[in-house]
Image (tube, rainbow, N blue to C red):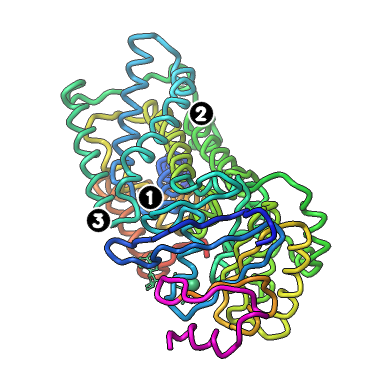
Amino acid sequence: MAQEALLAVDGVSVFYDRFRALADIDVAVGGGEIVSIIGANGAGKSTLLKAILGQAGRVEGRIWLAGEDIVGRTTAAIVALGVMLVPEGRRLFPSLTVEENLWLGWDVGRRGEFGFAELWQLFPQLAERKRQKAGSLSGGQQQMVALGRALLANPRLLLCDEISLGLAPIVIDELYALIPRIKERGVGIVVVEQDISRSLAIADRFYCLLEGRVVLAGRPGEVGRETVVQRYFGL
Amino acid sequence: MAAVWINQLLQGVLLGGLYTMFAIGLSLSAGVMRFVNIAHGDFIVLACFALLILTTSLGLNPVVATLAILPLAFAAGFALQRFLLQRVVGENLLLVVLVTFGLSIIIENGLLQGFGADPEKLSGGWMETATIGLGHGINMGLFQVVTLAAAVALVAALDLLLYRSGIGAKIRAVADDVVAADLIGLSSVRIYAVAMGISFVTIAIAAGFMSIWTDFDPSSGPTRLLIAFEAIVLGGLGSIWGSLVGGIVLGIAQSVGAQFDVAWQMLAGHLVFLLVLVVRPQGLFPKY
Ligand SMILES: Nc1ncnc2c1ncn2[C@@H]1O[C@H](COP(=O)(O)OP(=O)(O)OP(=O)(O)O)[C@@H](O)[C@H]1O
Ligand SMILES: [Mg+2]
């Protein structure tokens, strides 16, 4: 890895009661790097992101963020250090307005150069719908709010969990076009997707999970597609 | 003859102000944390006794005494949620109900030990006896009018807090989706505790008015809980202004019922509650 690691997941296992959802995982993400996590349903992708945020079950091992071990810290503290999640299924607060949803991201996060002015510029559609209830937005607009909410926290590390879920291809393209622009700001980005092609197209590096283990890792250009597909399905 | 009925109607509306105060805190805690604090009424009575001590032994004016216990009430609600109820919240609804039911019994028996079963009351002095005459034999007690005005102000203040402040947005976010709130670093545990603290502030204010309005004894709690519960269900769960409407509807039902027969007072309230529940199970002003 070229950059000094922003995030280093170091021998991490995650348990939900007796069930081990992640087994001795090593994952690293640099600043300004896009890292893709792929894997089938139940592979443990969301669990990895939640573990980083302190929202998974019991975590063993260490998770370093810019040199600090964040295992055991509260989510609020981890977010304040500069980690923010775009949750699977968007998870907006439907009865709150668009603006209120966004404000919450700004409130929990770090102060930084990304503010509401930048946000409205990035998502003009949302500016027109500030006062609308988030629950009344279209799926694509909701995903913009979820992404915007995360960006307003000025994260150093942005975790995106299946942002393409349930959206039209054209909307997905729009959203994915934004990821490199966020990367330019030096933000480390973890992209979780089931869609292998889309995910690898954007990534600098990737990890493939299978039943809680990393079964393949590398740079998209350096690993053949056949190999990725085989490992993805555990063949 | 008409004057008698108009008078009863008016007294009912005023009584609704007091009922709104019982209801508003329960509406907040039930709407945000999704459980009914069975000890809600007993906490109101507990606050009444705290006011009794402050006014009799320290000789404080009831208004001053009420203001004095507001910060204490916030702290008590915060601590109760943070250190006791939070342990059982989300795990199992029945467990929360049992814990608050246990609290209800503890408070009631504790008060019985400390104060005995005799009814107590605070004196509101001149404020309590002053009346406003509207002619035709229709009179309103000044204190009752002030209570209704305070209830409306309390509802408006809570509405502002919930819809115009940062902590209000956080409380509504947690009520919407507590898992999502935790995922983005809104600490639901703290926000729940703040919400319960606010609920307890309304409990203390309700106690301030109730302790002057009517007699209370250690076993007065459950009736207050029932009234609060009926008012918030009538108004629509989670709707702040709905508790005002629910409180007033109950007040009118009881007051008009009592005009037929005194024994009918409580029953009339329950009947109206059941009737609305059958016709409009979502309440008069559903939130969503
Ligand atoms: N809260 C939980 N309690 C118990 N088991 C859980 C919990 N969350 C996840 N799991 C289990 O952990 C495993 C990994 O789940 P996870 O949600 O991380 O998968 P995923 O890779 O994100 O899948 P998907 O692509 O369907 O989102 C699954 O077997 C799942 O059933
Ligand atoms: Mg997932």
Label 2 – label 3 distance at C-alpha: 43 Å
Given the image, what chain letter belongs to the residue carrying mark 1? B
Residue in view at x 22 percent, y 49 percent: B98
User: Badge 1: how crowded within 10 Å, few (<14), some, or many (20+)?
Assistant: many
Q: Does the magenta stretch include residue A221?
A: yes
Could you tell me which residue is drawn at 77 percent across and 53 percent down? A114
- Amino acid on which disc 3 is placed: Leu
Q: Is any part of residue B195 visible from this angle?
A: yes
- SS label for mark 3: helix
Name the chain under label 2.
B
Residue B173: x and y in percent read 54, 55
Q: Is mark 2 on a helix, strand or loop?
A: helix
| Of marks 3 and 1, the one in the foreground | 3
Residue B8, image x and y in percent?
42, 45
Query: Are marks 2 and 3 in one subunit?
Result: yes
Q: Give the labeled residue for mark 3.
A: B94
- Looking at the rendered structure, which numbered label has been put on residue B89? none
User: Would residue A217 appear left or right of B278 to someone viewing this image?
Assistant: right
In primary-sequence order, the first of circles 3 and 1 is: 3
Residue at left offset 36%, top offset 27%: B211
Amino acid beneath label 1? Val
Q: Which of marks 2 and 3 is nearer the N terminus?
A: 3
**Which residue lies under the disc numbered 2?**
B142
How far is mark 3 from mark 1, CA to CA? 37 Å
Residue under numbered circle 1:
B256
Vertical order, B218 against A58 (above or below): above
Frontmost residue, B259 versus A100? A100
